[in-house]
Image (cartoon, rainbow, N blue to C red):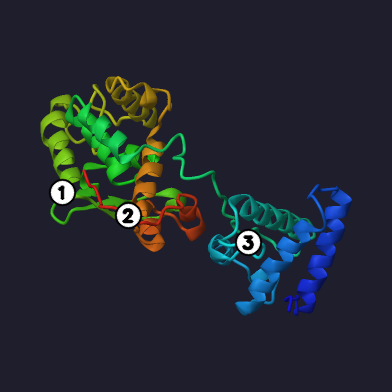
Amino acid sequence: MKKVIQTPSFENLINDFDRYVKVKNYKQGKGKMFQSCVSEFLIWLEEKGINKIKSVTSKQSIDYFEYLTTRPNKRRAGTLAEKTIKLHLYAIGLFQKNLLEKKEIENGFYIPSIGSGNQTPRNILSVEEIKIVYLSCQNALEQAVLSLAYGCGLRRSEIEALNVRDIQFSNGMLLVRNGKGGKRREVPMSDSVLEYLKKYLYKERGQKLDSKNQLEEAFFINSKGKRMTGEHLNDTLKKMIEQTNNYELIKKDLTLHCLRHSIATHLQENNAGFDFIRRFLGHSEINTTYIYAIKNKKRKPVTTF
C-alpha cells in the first residue's frame, strides 16, 4: 500500500509546493516528479517523529541523503541511481526555496550534493600528491607551512595569526586562540608535524630576528623579522608547488585552503567521525563538515606525515 502524508500541515505544504512548481513552470518530465520527491521526504520525516517543518535541521537532511543512497529501487534491482538521487535533492532544494519565500522557515537547512562517481575534486590533493609536495620542500619554513595547513588543517588567517606561544610542544597541542567566529580550539599535532615545527622555530626563525625585534610573537616571520602575511604564506605554497615540477599539481592553482580541504577528505576516507573532524577543523555546524564527505566509506590505512 502506497504511503501518504498524515500531517495536515505537511499536506498543506505539499499542495502549496505543487502550485509553486506550476507557477514557476519548472520542467520535471512526466507526472509530478518534484512533488513525489518532496512527498517522500515529508513522509520520511513523519516516520522519524518530525511533524513541524521548522524542526527540520541539517542533520535530518544529511540523514535523509544517507537514506536515499541506500533505498531500494522500486522499479529494478539495486539502489537508486545517482541521477535519481540528484533529482530528489534538487526537488528538496526547490521545496526549501518555496518555504523561505513563504516564510514557513526562517533559515534554510543544508542540502547535500552528490558528484559523479568517485572523482576527486580539482582542488583536493591525494595522499600521494601531498607526499610529493613534502619531498619538494627546500627548507624548514616550507615544511612548517605545509604541516600547519595540511597536518593541522588551519585556515590561512589562523596560520598568519599563530604565535610562538600557541604551539605547545610539551603536550603536542596547537592552540587557535581566535578562529572563525572568534572561536578558540586545540588541535592535536602528529610527531612529524611537531618535528617540522621545531626545526623551523629553532633553526630558521631565529636567523631572521635581529636585536630590534627579538620579542616578535609571530610564529612565521618574513625577512625583516615581522609577522608574515597570509598572502606571503600563500605565495610560499605556490613556490613549493612549482618546485615539484609536476604539471598536474601546478595546473590546480592550489591555495592553503585547498590543503585544509585535503586533510578533511583524507580523514573521512579513513573513517574519522564527523564530530572529530568538526572539532579538528573548527566548524560550528556539522553541515559544514559534511561538505567534505566522500562516497567511499571503505577503511584505508591511515597515513600521517
Give me the C-alpha separation between circle 3 and circle 2. Answer: 32 Å
What residue is disc 2 on?
Answer: 270
The amino acid type of the residue labelled 3 equals Arg
* Relative vertical location of residue 6 with respect to residue 106 in this rendering, above or below: below
* Labels 1 and 3: the sequence-earlier one: 3
Image side of residue 256 versus residue 11, left or right: left
**What label does residue 191 carry, if any?**
1
Tag nearer the camera, 3 or 2: 3
Residue 254 quadrant: top left
Residue drawn where x is 65% and y is 58% of the image: 108
Residue drawn where x is 11% and y is 36% of the image: 202
Does the rendering let one see residue 285?
Answer: no
Q: Position of residue 273 (x, y in %)?
A: 37, 62
The amino acid type of the residue labelled 1 equals Asp
Image side of residue 202 versus residue 158, left or right: left
The amino acid type of the residue labelled 2 equals Asn
Tag nearer the camera, 1 or 3: 3
Give me the C-alpha separation between circle 1 and circle 2. Answer: 19 Å
Residue 5 quadrant: bottom right
Q: Position of residue 147 (x, y in %)?
A: 25, 40
What residue is disc 3 on?
Answer: 76
Q: Position of residue 97 (x, y in %)?
A: 73, 54
Q: Nearer the viewer, residue 250 or 255?
A: 250
**Where does the C terminus fall, quadrant-wise?**
top left
